[in-house]
Image (cartoon, grey):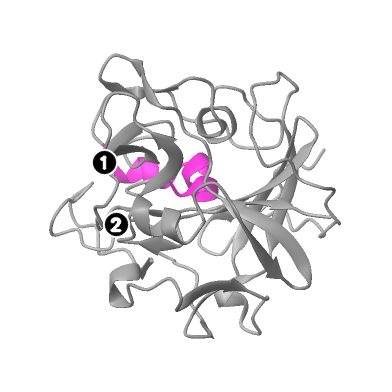
Amino acid sequence: MISQSHWEEGGLYNPRPRWSVLPVGIRSWDSRTVTPRFLGLRDFGSLRLDGQPVRRAQRPWLVDVSLLRPVPGLPDGDIADFEAAPDFARWTLADTPDDPASCLRWVAIEDSGRQLLICDRMILARVSWDDLDAAGYVRGREVTMDGRSFICRLLTGGAEFRTAEDGYAGGAPANEWDRLIGGDEPIDGLPVAPQRLARPLTLADMDTAHNRLWNWFGAVSWTQEPFRHRATARCCRGFHSAGFFYLNTQSHRHEDIGWRPILEALA
């Protein structure tokens, strides 16, 4: 078991595990009860715009705080902005770049026989669920990075509030976000998720070990599911807490909502 050893790059959780070859992935998620196992962090691959690597965000929260400021004094985030080039033909996931600052970072977790690579932060803001769906990234499309083939998709995140209109309680039914990020099932070697308390965010929330790993503070990640009670709504997670459940119109592009990919390896 890999455990916490040190902090680097502004407090990011980084025990420097080695890459290992992953077995065949399973495309659909289910609710089997095998305890997930943390395998370490993997730095590889890149997001590219017109073939050029995009630097990994160092302020991985909403890109315009004038519209919605989580805490006083917070500067704009620096996540790549889809509306600067609103055409997925120009955005690609590609090989590891020469510059480590443009390398994507993934949290590797073994879960029910699958080895998953979940991006540690949102990599593209102001992109709608419809944009991602049209590009094939909601339920999965094949991508190749460093000669390895993966299915790239969104995490599952639930289709309705777990408790009526209480986003802090999480989503239902059982889903990957709540299980692997939101704290429903603690994973040995990973920081414990904060309690699900309805309260305003503070800078202390940004500085928690859990947020340093998962970067959910002020950032809402689209998930796969349509909201069960509104045809045009899609579910998304994060911003107010690690397990916060939210919904937004599927065609809307917002400064605080975006793309956090998950990879499953192909043979």
Task: Quadrant for residue 126, please give it.
Answer: bottom left
Mark 1 burial class by Cα count in 10 Å: few <14, some 14-19, many 20+: many
Q: Which image quadrant: the N terminus?
A: top right
The secondary structure type at the circle numbered 1 is strand
Residue 63: x percent and y percent?
28, 63
Residue at 28%, 23% (x, y): give it: 229
From the top left corner, tell me how far across and down residue 11 is, in percent. 53, 56
Amino acid type for the residue under numbered disc 2:
Leu
Is residue 218 toward the left or the right of residue 102 in the image?
A: left
**Element type where label 2 sits in the image:** loop
Residue 13 visible from this viewpoint: no
Q: Nearer the viewer, residue 19 or 2?
A: 19
Q: Quadrant of residue 261?
A: bottom right
> Which is nearer the eye, 227 or 39?
227
What residue is pinned by disc 1? Answer: 248
Q: Which residue is mark 2?
A: 62
The region drawn magenta spans 201-216
Amino acid found under the numbered disc labelled 1: Asn
Quadrant location of the C terminus in the rendered image: bottom right
Please check the rendered image and state whether residue 40 is part of the magenta-colored stretch, yes or no: no
Q: Which residue: 52% across, 34% down? A: 177
247 sits left or right of 69 in the view? right
Task: Name the residue located 50 percent from the left edge and 62 percent from the top edge.
Answer: 10
Q: CA distance from mark 2 to mark 1?
A: 15 Å
At x 61%, y 60%, the residue is 105
